[in-house]
Image (cartoon, rainbow, N blue to C red):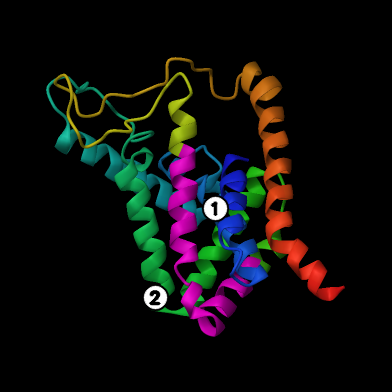
């Protein structure tokens, strides 16, 4: 939901873009908000593409753990055995994801379409929907953008970065925290998990009863704000 809210904010800033580009920004940001959890085999992201994404999740988990042990300092625990909430939950990790998306978009329009299709599929799974049609539509729009409106190609990597960033900022508010400042070292540790002064448990009652309804209200308000900026001029022009 935070990814969708951020995507609506991005789409509002893209008022000059064609409407399909704005919708693609919303879907891409929402889907990318689940990407950082590709380091955990039980999360939504590894289940989005079947065997291929589960295998990818195992590889990312192993690589994340290897980077941890290669860069940790004396104060970081040596017995760490999981790569979850490590490099994929850092700002450099967000930049890397954005760079991969940008490279695929520049490689070939079909590659960018596959990226958009997978991110849309991921968003639908996060919203507990099948979303096969939405995923195919997002892929088609991405191919159309990369062939007919190439000047807007950068929307996909920017939306991917924004979605990943929203994810790790949200996890920083939870009890577990994130290594947000990596690779900066502080107090003899490079992988210190940072949290805010006020936190809550992920998936707990507070998140479901208080946080989720508040996010739903924010999502509706963001939708109205985007509609006022993007859709109202179209309605006025039609009238």
* Residue on which disc 2 sits: 106
* Left or right side of 207 for 114: left
Is 54 rendered above or below residue 75? below
* Residue on which disc 1 sits: 29
Question: Residue shown at 39%/45% (left/top)?
Answer: 58
Q: Can residue 49 be seen in this view?
A: no
Place of residue 21 in the rendered image (x, y in percent of width and height, measured from the top left): 60, 68
Callout 2: helix, strand or loop?
Answer: helix
The residue closer to the viewer here, 23 or 60, is: 23
Place of residue 153 in the rendered image (x, y in percent of width and height, measured from the top left): 47, 72
- Number of other residues with Cα within 10 Å of mark 1, as a class: few under 14, some 14 to 19, many 20 or more: many
Q: Does the magenta stretch include residue 152?
A: yes
N-term-proximal mark, 1 vs 2 = 1
Q: Residue 18 carries which label?
A: none
Place of residue 6 in the rendered image (x, y in percent of width and height, measured from the top left): 56, 46
* Left or right side of 33 for 106: left
Tell me where the magenta segment starts and ends, as one range: 138-167
Q: Is residue 156 magenta?
A: yes
Q: What secondary structure is the stretch in magenta mostly built from?
A: helix
Callout 1: helix, strand or loop?
Answer: helix
Question: Residue shown at 42%/21% (left/top)?
Answer: 176
């Amino acid at each position: 939901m935070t990814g969708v809210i951020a995507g609506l904010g991005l789409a509002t800033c893209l008022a000059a873009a064609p409407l399909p580009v704005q919708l693609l920004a919303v879907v891409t940001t929402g889907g990318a908000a689940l990407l950082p959890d590709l380091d955990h085999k039980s999360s939504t992201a590894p289940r989005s593409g079947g065997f291929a994404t589960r295998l990818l999740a195992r590889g990312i988990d192993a690589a994340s753990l290897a980077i941890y042990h290669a860069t940790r300092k004396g104060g970081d625990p040596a017995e760490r055995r999981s790569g979850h909430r490590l490099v994929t939950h850092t700002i450099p990790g967000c930049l890397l994801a954005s760079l991969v998306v940008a490279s695929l978009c520049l490689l070939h329009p079909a590659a960018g379409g596959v990226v958009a299709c997978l991110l849309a599929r991921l968003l639908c799974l996060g919203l507990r929907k099948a979303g096969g049609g939405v995923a195919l539509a997002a892929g088609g729009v991405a191919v159309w953008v990369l062939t007919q409106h190439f000047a807007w190609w950068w929307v996909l990597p920017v939306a991917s970065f924004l979605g990943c960033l929203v994810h790790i900022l949200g996890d920083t508010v939870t009890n577990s925290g994130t290594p947000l400042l990596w690779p900066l070292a502080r107090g003899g540790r490079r992988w210190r998990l940072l949290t805010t002064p006020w936190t809550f448990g992920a998936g707990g009652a507070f998140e479901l009863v208080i946080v989720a309804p508040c996010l739903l209200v924010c999502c509706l308000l963001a939708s109205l704000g985007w509609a006022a900026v993007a859709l109202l001029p179209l309605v006025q022009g039609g009238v």
